[in-house]
Image (tube, helix red, strand yellow):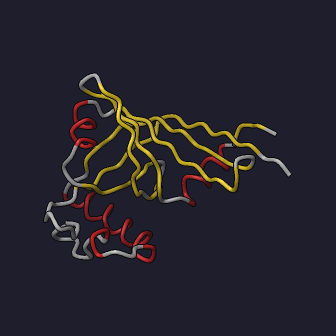
Amino acid sequence: MLGELTTKEIEQLLSDNVIGRIGCYADGRVYVVPVTYIYDDGCAIGHTSEGLKIHMLRENPSCCFEVDQYENLANWKSVIAWGIFEELHGDAAAIGMQKLVQRLMPMMTSQTSQPSHGLEQVHRHDTSGKKAIIYKIRFINKSGRFEKRQ
């Protein structure tokens, strides 16, 4: 059976997962990239460093976000959300990083993927030494679909 997820099911899928995909468009190109995120108050919050994704989102902050959950090819759920990218700074970035650390730290297995606990100097440990960019995507519209077979 194919169907649409309810608003409650959409919210649950976004809350339960921590890996999603951002779709962005700028400079005549479409780019889709997986990201680690947390869902908080209608927004995806994440961290990254300078690169193509940030360049494109700064150029055009309108983006798409996708999350899915698969048991098998006949049993899955997927949410697509449209939203606006925004970089966080100061206290908002510190709070965002704190929420990320609380939710994601227990799942992290490599030092290069671990954000710092030091909120006064928000950065991410990596071999390039780049400073983290904390961001949120404020969702404007969401839809969800599923397939369920017994």
Residue 113 vs 148, above or below: the answer is: below
Q: Which percent across, then down, holds residue 72?
A: 70, 53
Q: Is residue 29 left or right of residue 3?
A: left
Residue 76 rendering spot, x and y as whole percentages: 68, 48
The image quarter in which residue 25 lies: top left
Residue visible at 71% across and 37% down in the picture: 4
The image shows residue 60, relative to residue 77, as above or below, that is above
Q: Position of residue 45 (x, y in %)?
A: 38, 54
Q: Residue at x 44, y 59 (%)?
A: 38
The picture places residue 112, in percent across and down from the top left corner, at 27, 70
> Residue at 36% across / 71% down in the picture?
101
The quarter of the picture where residue 78 lies is: top right
Count every numbered label the image shows and give the total: 0
61 with respect to 11 (left or right) = left
Q: Nearer the viewer, residue 132 or 42?
A: 132
- Image quarter where the N terminus lies is top right
**Residue found farthest to the front:** 73
Residue drawn at 24 percent across, 43 percent down? 54
Question: Would residue 99 appear left or right of 142 to someone viewing this image?
Answer: left
Residue 137, above or below 132: above
